[in-house]
Amino acid sequence: MNIRAYETRDEAAVVALWQECGLTRPWNDPRRDIARKLTEQPELFLVGIHEDKVVATAMAGFDGHRGWVYYLAVAPGMRRKSFGRMLMREAERLLVERGCPKLNLQIRSSNLDAVAFYRALGYEPDAVVSFGRRLIADDSAVQDPAADRADC
């Protein structure tokens, strides 16, 4: 697998990969997520290419304090070939070049395969609670009905 920065011609393949891997949610428009990423550190949006096809992605960023990785995806038929490990190592390398002291990521607690993958790479759970609040709605996407509940 060759790793390179995302190019606009990759969009359809990337969105299809994210959908195949179960990374998309109705309230997040993946095309808007891509467009937003391209405005900030686009060189940290990585794609893995195998036989001229996008088979893996990782979206990284550094805010000057911590690094983050989102949308790590490997096509189901391409797993167990170290492609995810390769992408994470490249993201780590690029973040270290920027002086990033720590890399954070979020995993859905139900995604046990991802938990095992990151543990095998040396990542450990942090003793934190993750909070979020949508500031800009993706109008073309179905909104999360739970987002309007006070207890969420």
Image: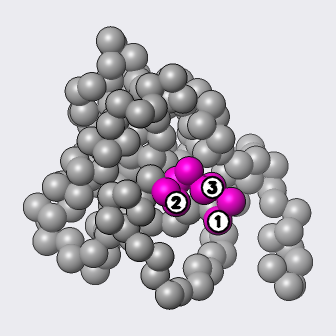
Tag 1 residue: 109
Tag 2 residue: 115
Q: Residues within 10 Å of mark 3 (few under 14, many from 20)?
A: few
Mark 2 residue element: helix
Do the residues bearing badges 2 and 1 touch, measured as CB atoms within 8 Å? Answer: yes
Q: Position of residue 63 (x, y in %)?
A: 31, 72
Instruction: Point out the image quarter for the N terminus.
Output: top left
Do the residues bearing badges 3 and 1 touch, measured as CB atoms within 8 Å? Answer: yes
Name the residue located 37 percent from the left edge and 42 percent from the top edge: 84
Mark 3 residue element: loop
Name the residue located 21 percent from the left edge and 76 percent from the top edge: 101
| Stretch in magenta | 109-116
The answer to whether residue 10 is left or right of residue 17 is left
Q: Residues within 10 Å of mark 1 (few under 14, many from 20)?
A: few
The answer to whether residue 129 is left or right of residue 118 is right
Tag 3 residue: 111
Q: Amino acid at mark 3?
A: Asn
Find the distance from the CA under tag 2 to the CA under tag 1. 8 Å
Q: Residue 47: which quarter of the image?
A: top left
Q: Main secondary structure of the magenta part?
A: helix
The answer to whether residue 77 is left or right of residue 91 is right
